[in-house]
Image (spheres, rainbow, N blue to C red):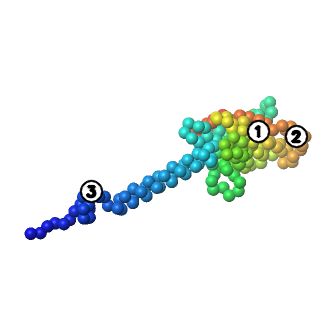
Amino acid sequence: MTTDKTEPYGIRGGAGRRPRHRRRGLTTIAVLAAMAVALLVARMTLIPWAYPLPGQPRLTGYWEGRIAYSDTDSRRILLQMRYDENCSMACDMTGRIKVCGAGRNTKGDLAGDVHNWRGSRFTLNPYLPRSKGDVNIEKLDGDWSGDVIRMRAKVEFLDADGSWESSRQPSAPPGFAMRHIDEGAFDAGCARG
């Protein structure tokens, strides 16, 4: 008479036991999930302007505003700002900028620094083509609160020959407000009017 000694899972007395490799797999998944949650919580805590808690506003994204250089010259400014963790030189944000109006639509890149952990104060440096005979944005300083950014622009006016005269420069940086827009409005850009 032959007795079959094979038991479930090929383990003696293993009818109620699970294989060890299955337990290790579940432990590994649990550890990876815990690490992902810890990373997410750390980002929300340390960089709340880029990774806010659910339902909270975000500094990164798409923004639109209108800057007035004079009573007769105002232009739309569109920004896309994103957190850049790979930037090698003191820049927390990178993105794109579009300036629309006065028959001169320009676009370029930008990089900026956040001055506090909440992101409520920051500076952006636009990299736009220099326009002779026009106003050029050199720097933007922002104060962010919720869905509004209050900007101050450092601008320079270049004469038609590319020269700079102190008497032709604005006395105070023009200030303006910006509000969130969606990606489609940014992509439509200057054509939107």
Q: Give coordinates of residue 130: x percent, y percent.
A: 77, 48
Give residue 63's mark: none
Give residue 16's mark: 3
Which residue position holds label 1? 152
Marks 3,1: beta carbons within 8 A: no
Q: Residue furthest front?
A: 13
Q: Nearer the viewer, mark 2 or mark 1?
A: 1
Could you say whether the residue bearing mark 3 is in a helix, strand or loop? Answer: helix
Q: Kindly report the distance in space between the C-alpha atoms of the residues bearing marks 3 and 2.
A: 87 Å
The residue drawn where x is 75% and y is 43% is 140
Q: Residue furthest left?
A: 1
Q: Kindly report the distance in space between the C-alpha atoms of the residues bearing marks 2 and 1.
A: 19 Å
Question: Which of the marked residues, 2 or 1, is nearer the chain's N terminus?
Answer: 1
Q: Nearer the viewer, mark 3 or mark 1?
A: 3
Could you say whether the residue bearing mark 2 is in a helix, strand or loop? Answer: helix
Give residue 168's mark: 2
Question: Which of the marked residues, 3 or 2, is nearer the chain's N terminus?
Answer: 3
What's the amino acid at mark 1? Arg
Marks 2,1: beta carbons within 8 A: no
For this view, does 173 lie left or right of residue 107? right
Asked whether 172 or 108 is in front, the reply is 172
What's the amino acid at mark 3? Gly
Marks 3,2: beta carbons within 8 A: no
Query: For mark 3, does the 10 Å Cα neighbourhood hold few (<14), some (14 to 19), or many (20 or more) residues?
Result: few
Inspect this view and state whether residue 99 appears. Answer: no
